[in-house]
Amino acid sequence: MKRTTEFLKHAVTRIDRDDGTILLTSDYTLGPVTDRTGDWLHNWADKAGDRVFIACTWNGATNPHFDYVR
């Protein structure tokens, strides 16, 4: 898998509540979203249906190992 250095810098606001709850919110504006996951998956499949999305491998262990693959 290719590594990238194109990540945004951290920009988070932390709010400590009296009950001990810690809220972390991003300072970045959320981009376009879809109402339903299925819509997003169909759109992704139309654009890049020949690429692997999730791969499951077994390495002899009891549980499978899932990878998100580009």
Image (spheres, helix red, strand yellow):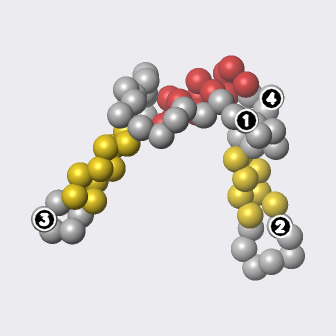
Distance Cα–Cα, label 3 vs label 2? 45 Å
On the rendered structure, is 23 left or right of 68? left
Position in image of residue 67 (x %, y %): 73, 53
Which residue is the extreme one toward the left? 18
Helix, strand or loop under label 3: loop
Q: Which residue is mark 4?
A: 50
Going 54% across and 32% down the picture, which residue do you hit?
8
Q: Are marks 1 and 2 in contact (CB under 8 Å)?
A: no
Between discs 4 and 2, the one toward the N terminus? 4
- Amino acid type at circle 1 is Thr
Which of the labelled discs sits on residue 13, or is there none?
none
Helix, strand or loop under label 1: loop
- Amino acid type at circle 3 is Asp
- Quadrant for residue 17, please give it: bottom left
Which of the labelled discs sits on residue 58, or is there none?
2
The residue nearer to you, when weighing 56 against 7, is: 7
Which label sits in the foreground, 4 or 3?
Answer: 3
- Amino acid type at circle 4 is Asp
Q: Which residue is mark 1?
A: 4
**Quarter of the rendering occupied by the N terminus:** top right
**Quarter of the rendering occupied by the C terminus:** top right
Which residue is the extreme one toward the right? 60
The residue nearer to you, when weighing 46 against 57, is: 57
Helix, strand or loop under label 2: loop
- Amino acid type at circle 2 is Trp
Q: Which residue is mark 3?
A: 18
